[in-house]
Image (spheres, rainbow, N blue to C red):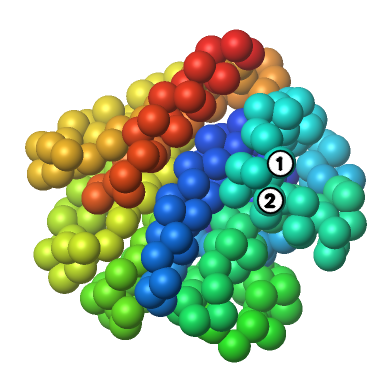
Amino acid sequence: MLSYQHAYHAGNLADVHKHALLAQALDYLTQKDKPLSYLETHAGRGLYDLSGAEAQKTGEAAQGISLVEQWFGADHPYRRALTAIREKHGPSAYPGSPLIAQTLLRDTDHIHLAELHPQEHAALHYTLSAAENTKVYQKDGFELAQSLCPPDPRRGLILIDPSWEVKDDYATMPRFVGTLTKKWNVGIVMIWYPILTDPQHKPMIAAIRDMHPDALIHEVAFPPARKGHRMIGSGMAILNPPWGLTDHATALTKRFKSL
């Protein structure tokens, strides 16, 4: 949705959940000396300033990564990405998932990023497109995924992370994922979704479970960022989860329960 601006929410607890699991999955994939494809349907701008007016207005990063970064040791891939990006962009820099992926992946891997919002796309292009292995598209992410799948190389991962401000996304996501996996049955598919006071995600997740009984469904709860805030948790539905990711998700659950 073109009105959504992630700068207000960058580094919040949902980002921590999503990015920690994404980094772990990418770390697993890069342990093999074979190139891979990374696709993202709703990439955002890729890099955020946690000292900026947007982040300061909501305070979500202060309750997110700034509070819980110690959960992750120096050798955790999420922490490694944060360290490398801050060294390049400054101590208040926070990466979106495209920059985390670009930081952890190799020159031989192929990165495809979609972002429809004109300003967010321009920022994304500025930050990431200099790398020869990265292509940035100003295009609807669902359309791009369908056009590229199966990607070359076929080994790889797609992150699907819409704003969820379009309510039809909940109804159409299972069908979209079903079509995608028929084309690309070996790809790791990661779908992030918010857990709201009105649990709109439940029918969607039930449908995904029916179609993909081996999917990893991982949900964490956390306090609302402020009074009246509707998001009270974060979910990830992961199809073809890489080996060991369930254990990492379980460890993350214990961390969130400590909040």
Q: Residue at x 23, y 56 (%)?
A: 177
Q: Amino acid at mark 2?
A: Arg
Q: Nearer the viewer, residue 110 or 106?
A: 106
Numbered circle sitting on residue 102: none
Number of numbered callouts drawn: 2
User: Which percent across, then down, holds residue 81?
Assistant: 67, 54
Q: Residue beneath label 2, please?
A: 80
User: Which residue carries the number 1 mark?
Assistant: 74
- Does 238 sit above or below residue 199? below
Q: Amino acid at mark 1?
A: Ala
Is residue 194 left or right of 258 when viewed as pictured?
Answer: left
User: Residue at the spot x=72%, y=78% of the render?
Assistant: 126
Using the rendered view, name the quadrant where residue 103 is placed. bottom right
- The quadrant the C terminus occupies is top right
Relative to 9, does residue 112 appear above or below in the rendering?
below
Q: Position of residue 112 (x, y in %)?
A: 47, 75
Q: Are marks 2 and 1 in contact (CB under 8 Å)?
A: yes
The residue drawn where x is 17% and y is 63% is 185
Q: CA distance from mark 2 to mark 1?
A: 6 Å
Residue 37 in the image, given as x and y percentages of width and height:
39, 73
Q: Is residue 143 above or below residue 28?
A: below
Q: Position of residue 161 (x, y in %)?
A: 45, 52
| Residue at the (50%, 17%) spot, across then down | 254
Q: Nearer the viewer, residue 81 or 178?
A: 81
